[in-house]
Image: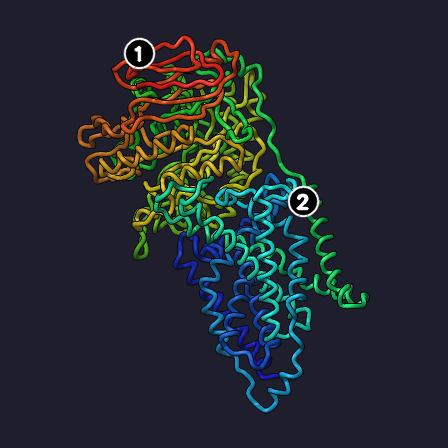
Amino acid sequence: MSRPSRRAPFAALVTVTALLAVCLAAAAADPTSLFAPLPWSALTVTPAHGLWSVAGVAVFLPVLAVVTAWGTVVSYRGADPATGRARMARRLWAVTVLAAALARLAQLLAETAGAAIHGGARTLAATALWDCGLTAGRTALIGWLPALLGALAYRRRRDAEEPRRRRHMPPHYGWRWSLTGTALPLALLGPLVGPMLWEGSPAASFYGEQLSLRRLPFGLDLGPGRFAVELATAAVVGAVLLSRSSRRFDYTRPSHLLLGGWLAALGGGAGAGVVQALLALPRDLGLSGGPGGGSLGSGDLFAVPDAALRISTGLSLGVAFGWAIVPALLLISRLLDVISGQRRRFATVVASATVLALGSWLLAQATPTTASAAPSVNAAARATADQDLPALTVRPPSGAEPAAITDVNGRQVLLRGVNVNQLVDYYAPTPGRQTVRPLADGDFAAMASLGFDVVRLDISWSALEPSRGHFDRTYLDRIRATVAEAAKHGLYTDLDLHEDAWGKAIAAPAGTSCPSGTTPALGYDGAPGWATITDGASRCQGLSRDLTPANARAFTAFYHDTDGIQTELTRAWALLAHTFAADPAVAGYGLLNEPGIGEDSPATSSVLLGAYYHRAVQAIRDAESASTGGFPHLVFVEPSVLWSGLGFDAAPPRGFSTDPYLVFAPHLYSQSITMDQSLGITLVSVERGFALAQQQAKAYGMPLWAGEWGWFGSNVPQNGAMMRRFAAAEDRALIGDAFWVWKQACGSPESDQHASEAGNLVGVDCATGKDLPPAGAVLSVLSRAYPHAAPGTLTRLATGADETGLSLAGTAPTSGEGTACTLSVWYPGKAKPTPTAHGIARLTEHQVAGGWLVSGCATGSYRLDLG
């Protein structure tokens, strides 16, 4: 036995210990868990609520240690005596990356096993596989340190036996043999695993490319062609790495070849990710069009996280097929043994790869896909057609036209308005100060005078169900009365189950002492105390209220339905849905405002969030169908709070629900309150924020609606300029929004408790309690002209540079009559608009509070310009 092999156990101990240490240090240093291989909470022992609560300690750490130790020992024992420390360090660095990926894969499967995921095992496996690539990428940033320490224990053998030992080293694998080992597994697994990663992952919408081989394989579509290039890159890069490493490491033993092949596959997968990143670079830099591209010169840095995600996805591809290199080589070697002649050997390789690829493609075609049922308008919904606020539904995407919100008359409805938080049950940080301002009929009249046609009414679970199983009927009556008041002024209502930082009960008790750099957490709003499970986690806030350990644990417990708390919330939704089942003034239901990322994103903030959405939607639909006169209402679903904080996030995977009435409703705060702004950089520009949201909505097949936006800083001119950029992007996207917020009280936990003023749109003087007038630049943007309802499909919408005037175009049925053909447009100000129209009959202008309503019967291709 050579000297290096005798040192293998010691080197393995050094490498494992160092890797565990840097993982712990990274988790402690990164409370966001965005860069650490594993969050700190998953590395600590807490009360066990199930396998998910101990998966970090019971699964991740043991797998990480075992694979790292195995890889180190195999590398030492199989090394050529001439192998230097630098090469050994690179080898051990790759071992740490592979070990972390496999540990994360095992942990995620254990953590989500048994969860009620729509899509079942395939969705869980896809998410776990994709996420293990993220962990591999993060480990690559820190794995060099344990690799260096492990390599220090390596000593090359320098004696008279070395030349003789070199002569007896097994021959290395040539490029043909190596290419066979990488190409065959990719030919078999690539068409199945590749689309699942690049199309079906929780971040697939960022990529914006359709790579599925379900379509015709020999068409001119660039997607499958590009996908083939990426798989070929993975095969070639992996083959080169396998061939080169075989010069220094003995691969005659299957276990040695398994490690070497898997490490080579990781490199090949990373190569495929690099190809994807390079192909996307022109778009990411705003140099070309297409979904997701910012405008030329937008100056954001989205190319950086996009490339990191693509390369990490490539690493997960390597994890997916690397294990199969050994059986592929063993299989082909047995086949070659029975075939004589070198020519036939090469033909056998080519024929085998072709047959495997064809069989895999056919299997991909046969794999079932999830599809949403077509939305329909039942008799109860149709009966509301002539009311002032007809029931709303969804028009599914068709060709290049995205899905859209429509009324039951077939008219596109944008829904533009404001958030109303005056029914929220807030924590009171300052005794004697009101946490919300009174809500009166005059508020809705003022909203209508700005041209709004929707309010996002924020309500609190803690007020609706203050004790478990007991619903407060008085609070429910307040909600019902508020909906009726809003409807009286022509305003739809989105009932939004609001939460911020989980709920009031997260507040740190008086006298809490926190480490330097953190402060005792405030309470905010959302869940009741009885549904707050923190298991003693810290209530000290660091970078963000949403990353407080107690908040993260409460959300994780919710996602795993610990103690049935998620089940209780779905019961609350069933009650609300039953109450408003026949009310067309209720546009729909917002299932959860800015859901927290929990302790283990993206598993919690994507796949398990999607599972909650699926359950809540089912509860709502069951209640609506069981109610007299009930009909399906819209359901607004959001990604996690990180979308608000970063401008993008891993959303629930496609297929988390097949309900056809869902609306994707992210909060578009790019260049406003996102975390990058505090660092003086811009990861996602306003324009790219819209493009990314459009991509995600398109991937889902859902309409897009911005549930929150606003406040680009206290600098009034800059705030106005940024709001105009937002408005222009919104008009181009042909969508609506709800501005944050109508009125905010001085005693709200979201207000500065020492400031003399509070609020956003309508401010308040904290000393006198009187309203403060909104800034003119804000009002001009929010009250700009737009269509309340447009027959058929809107194709263009734009206002002037100073928010004056309007130009819109659309296509409608050529035989429309009555409400179905009625175009209704809001126009602000006292001056009567001057219309120029084409394809619009019986055009009239009617003055209302705050402006004008311009209406007419639009048929065919129509256009309206207002000046």
Instruction: Give the percent coordinates (x, y) of residue 528.
Output: 42, 36
Instruction: Give the percent coordinates (x, y) of residue 268.
Output: 57, 60
- The residue identified by callout 2 is 364
- In the picture, the quarter occupied by the N terminus is bottom right
At horizontal 52% and vertical 54% (from top left) the residue drawn is: 275
Left or right placement of residue 497 versus residue 5 in this view: left
- In the picture, the quarter occupied by the C terminus is top left
Which badge, 2 or 1, is on the more N-terminal residue? Answer: 2
- The residue identified by callout 1 is 847
Closer to us: 419 or 3: 3
Instruction: Give the percent coordinates (x, y) of residue 224.
Output: 60, 45
Q: Quadrant of residue 416?
A: top left
Residues tagged 2 and 1 counted as in contact (Cβ below 8 A): no
Left or right placement of residue 504 versus residue 234 in this view: left
Q: Amino acid at mark 2?
A: Ala
Q: Amino acid at mark 1?
A: Gln
